[in-house]
Amino acid sequence: MKKGGLVPDVYTYTVLIDSFCKSGLIEQARNWFDEMVRTGCTPNVVTYTALIHAYLKAKKVSNADELFQMMLSQGCKPTIITYTALIDGHCKAGQIEKACQIYARMRGDVEIPNLDLYFSVDDGEAKEPNVYTYGALVNGLCKVYKVKEARDLLDAMSAAACKPNQILYDALIDGFCKVGKLDEAQEVFAMMSKDGYSANVYTYSSLIDRLFKDKRLDLALKVLSKMLENSCAPNVVIYTEIIDGLCKSGKTDEAYKLMLMMEEKGCFPNVVTYTAMIDGFGKEGKIDKCLKLLREMGSKGCAPNFITYSVLIKHCCVAGLLDEACELLDEMKQTYWPKHISSYRKVIEGFNREFLDSLGILDEMNKTESIPIVPVYRILIDNLLKAERLEVALELYKEIESFSSFSAAIKSINDALISSLSLAGKVNEAFELYGDMIRKGGIPELSTFVHLIKGLIKVNRWEEVLNISYSICHNHKILVRAVESSAPS
């Protein structure tokens, strides 16, 4: 076009910029914008808004703010679409207070604190928000549990004769459910129905989730029945939530029937569904059913993951089926072992946080930022020690040492092994583990020395008992002197 002597106009540049923005190529879009300004072609509100929206979508809020300021300084007046993009972008970036301030200034409210810099140039015109503006702000407020403020906006919409849409109603219902205000959620649900909107999967999901949290199982099942009556097919998330709730209430037979029913209706269980069902049967000691489900999910093309195996290994250990637990560990390592923390985070998506906490998985991830394999090994090693199968426990400990850094959890396993080996009279092996801990920077507890002394007494190695006892007393005296000397006089 340029070679032919044609000069791009504002329309051409805007189409280019908008296309690059929608493709996620923001830097190239900005290059076109800068070229446009350099050549004396003045951007219009559509040009600015397209680039501002792209920056906000990419969470580059400061770039969007800078461009908006430039827009105002050039005398280009923003539209309601520009303001809506700004409010939505700031909400999604977690800057709810700023989004509320922009909304207030947009409406013409004066002297908003801390916003003078942002609006150092004022376009001098108030703008009336539309349903999308309200929707962005309601959703943002609900995400940070400010449901009262979100509800007030619904009243403001009514006063402005702006009819809410389904998305806004769903966001508000979900917000009330998240903070445990089920009566208010039902009130908004009634308003939504009155406005002619039918509840969808998202609406029902919010209500069912709250009902289970409040342990109102019968009502949750009624909501499920209502969904089916209204030809609103539940998705796998809703079915799984109900199955998990039934299992937690000890109603595993009903949960299993529901899992079969969902398959009949063409909604197939996923790995989270199967894991919830396996956990339910496991808590009732029905290990045979757990193992059957594990094989069944594989045959149906639903691969078990690290969490599934962790749950099953735990229940096998509780039931005393240690050989089966060891076999499951080997199978998991060969097939479903997440190699990196990023892939592991993908694995745990969809699982209830409380459920993961009960396995000790989230705690391990937060402390070490590594794949939390230690809890699985610890369960198995602890149970092997109780069954006095020390050799197998030692093998597993050496295995975990080879691919995991020495953490508090590893040290705890080390202490447990030293205690068991000492009681079994295997003092040399116990001292090897003690030496290994020292070399890796571990600080032994007093209880560790006590276990070692008991082991030495058991095999009549009295001279070493005296040496260790003297060492403990000597180090204690040094510590006391150090404390006394550091104390203020």
Image (cartoon, helix red, strand yellow):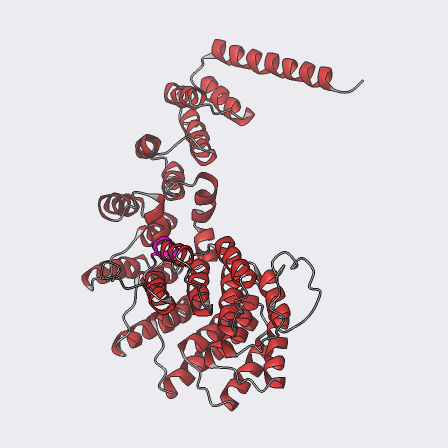
* Quarter of the rendering containing residue 286: bottom left
Q: Which quadrant of the rendered structure holds the C terminus?
A: top right
Tell me residue 161's x, y (percent).
58, 87
What residue sits 58% from the left and 78% below the top?
Answer: 128
The answer to which image quadrant residue 396 occupies is top left
With 186 as the anchor, is 30 left or right in this view?
left
| Between 329 and 223, the one nearer to me in the picture | 223
In the rendered structure, the answer to whether residue 452 lies left or right of residue 187 reads left
Q: Which residues are magenta?
A: 24-30
Asked whether 470 falls inside the magenta stretch, the response is no
Quadrant where the N terminus sits is: bottom left
Q: Closest to the observer: 13 or 150?
A: 13
Q: x%, y% of residue 119?
A: 62, 61
- Residue drawn 44% across and 86% down? 198
Name the residue rendered at 30%, 75% in the picture.
262
User: In the rendered image of this protein, does residue 153 appear above or below residue 484?
Assistant: below
Q: Position of residue 227 (x, y in %)?
A: 40, 83
Q: Is residue 323 above or below residue 11?
A: above
Q: Residue furthest left?
A: 299
Residue farthest to the right, as pictured: 489
Q: Magenta part mainly helix, strand or loop? A: helix
Query: Compared with residue 329, is residue 32 higher up or lower down, i.e. above or below?
Result: below
Query: Is residue 319 in sight in this rendering?
Result: no
Count the marks: 0
Q: Is residue 17 left or right of residue 357?
A: left
Of all residues, the one furthest to the front in this rendering is: 5
In the rendered image, residue 415, in percent from the top left (x then y), is placed at 46, 30
* Quarter residue 40 falls in: bottom left
